[in-house]
Image (cartoon, rainbow, N blue to C red):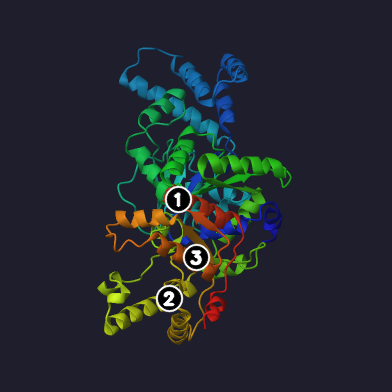
Amino acid sequence: MNELNAALVRQPALPRFMCHLYQRLQQQRLNLVTGAGISINAGVPNWYGLLERLAAHSATLAGDFRAHRTAGLTPEYLGQIIYNRHRNSGDEDLSASGEATVNHDWAKSIHEAIYKDVAPKITDLLDSHPYLSQLKDLVRKVPFVVNFNFDDILAQSVGFRSQLDKSTRSYSVEWRPALLDRPNHTTIYHVNGLLPQASLKKRSPTLIFTEDSFADAIARAPGVSAEYIFMRFVQNTMLIIGHSLADASLKNYLRLNRDKSPANHHYMIHWLHDEDALNGEQRSDIFNANLDLYNVFTLFLTSAEMREFFLLLNLEPREFGDKLDEMGEDRCSCRHYYIVGPVAAGKSSLLEHLRCFETYEEWTQPPPSEMYRSFKQLSQEESEKVDSFIYGELKEKNRIMHAAGVGFHFMDRGPLDLYAFSENESENKEKTAAMKRIITRHRPLQNGGIIFLQAKAETLVERNYTRGRSPEQAGSKDYFEAQIAALKDIYKPSFVYNTEGQTPGQIAKKVVRRVLLKGYEPIDLTEVMDRYA
């Protein structure tokens, strides 16, 4: 962990980011996006370097390539020029076999340019690469990897098994969308095509390399491949490694996710050549731009820090939790939050948008029908039935929160909400005695942060109407104002979110950024409960 000391000073929120990433990994909801940066460390040239090697086949083309690059042409456009020179070097009117020969020779040229300086044995690559050995172990734990590279270096490393390797997880390398996700399986999806190092291995029929092929890929965007990848971005948390966000399709997926699922954030590792490669203002500029444009949290790490970062993510839950409990300012591997507010404030809607964490509903089982009637209309037997259900639920929800593992945990309603529905202090004392007898006899209330939602009383009445409540059931302005005041008096929340005129997604986005970028401030619920004794 010493390798991360400088990173923790540079980015105090790093432990929180790691906590969230690890939680998503355990939920099988962490996917990876890999780019050229990984392969460059293995000896593969960057895009311009690859183009220079392809252009070097002709002395005149090499000179023209330099002129075109100086003129500011994009890599895709430069690739198109090189391909046209290659294709037009022979007969223009090609037969089917001639076309196949041209494409074969083109792919062969790219293959030679990619692997010219790459070690032929994967064991040598694993020894020399700064973090590939640790990354391959992480890849084996995730269900899906979007690989923007042509090379199969990552797949080779995943396929390598040492004598000490006990993993039974299978993997596959694809360039077409798989029909079905398999359990205990990792899919490495080469979105731009695949050109394996071993020449006899099967490669993809096409490579998205030139301006023309990129245009074809964009034209196919509404098709199954684009939808296949896009849903990964909406339903999962992506960790982007070795990528500069230069790819237009990746940026498009990120923007679409930002707009469709505002609370779902992804992560990107921004590689630093050394610890002082960027000053604080420069890092802040990049971080804020990526967050605003793409809903992406940026992690600034050197190669050595990336190695340690992957090592930690590969730990077993108990060991990872112990490490996180010693790390940074928070020193916390498990964070609990209660979503609190009056009826119709938007608690359940917010919870629905926080599925990128661990969430718990208001009730663990269906409430009795008596819960939906006015308490004033219930008989003593019916009231006892409702009380038994409520206290049983509070006990079970408290057990669940105590058992929660590494990560962020959000529960609909706090355990002390019932005080807001009391008519007098005597009733509060009775409720406190019941909680101590039933709920906290063996374990205290789990402390947690309070996410407080509110809206104007008039708005809450209107929302109840839209839920199908009759005017008699919808509540009054005075009722809701009193409920808001009572809940605030109970929890004294530091952070209040007004849901007036905002969508649940917009509120969830604020909550996510609050809990991931700011410190954890739980309140002592047992101490609050004792106030009502």
Question: Which secondary structure lies at badge 1?
Answer: loop
Q: As rendered, which of 90 and 425 lies closer to the eye?
A: 425
Does residue 129 lie above or below 340 as drawn? above
Question: Which secondary structure lies at badge 2?
Answer: loop
Circle nearer the N terminus (3, 2)? 2
Which residue is labeled 2 in the image?
A: 422
Which residue is labeled 3 in the image?
A: 485
CA separation, marks 3 and 2? 13 Å
CA separation, marks 1 and 3? 17 Å
Circle nearer the N terminus (1, 3)? 3
Q: As rendered, which of 273 and 383 lies closer to the eye?
A: 383
Which residue is labeled 1 in the image?
A: 500
Residue type, label 3 = Ala
Q: Residue 210: x, y in percent?
A: 46, 25
User: Residue, x 57% and y 74% (percent of image)?
Assistant: 524
CA separation, marks 2 and 1? 27 Å
Frontmost of labels 2 and 1 is 2
User: How crowded is the residue under tag 2: few (<14 C-alpha within 10 Å), some, or many (20+)?
Assistant: some
Total marks in image: 3
Q: Residue 436: x, y in percent?
A: 47, 85
Q: Residue 492: x, y in percent?
A: 56, 67
Question: Can residue 319 be spotted in the picture?
Answer: yes
Q: As rendered, which of 105 and 47 lies closer to the eye?
A: 47
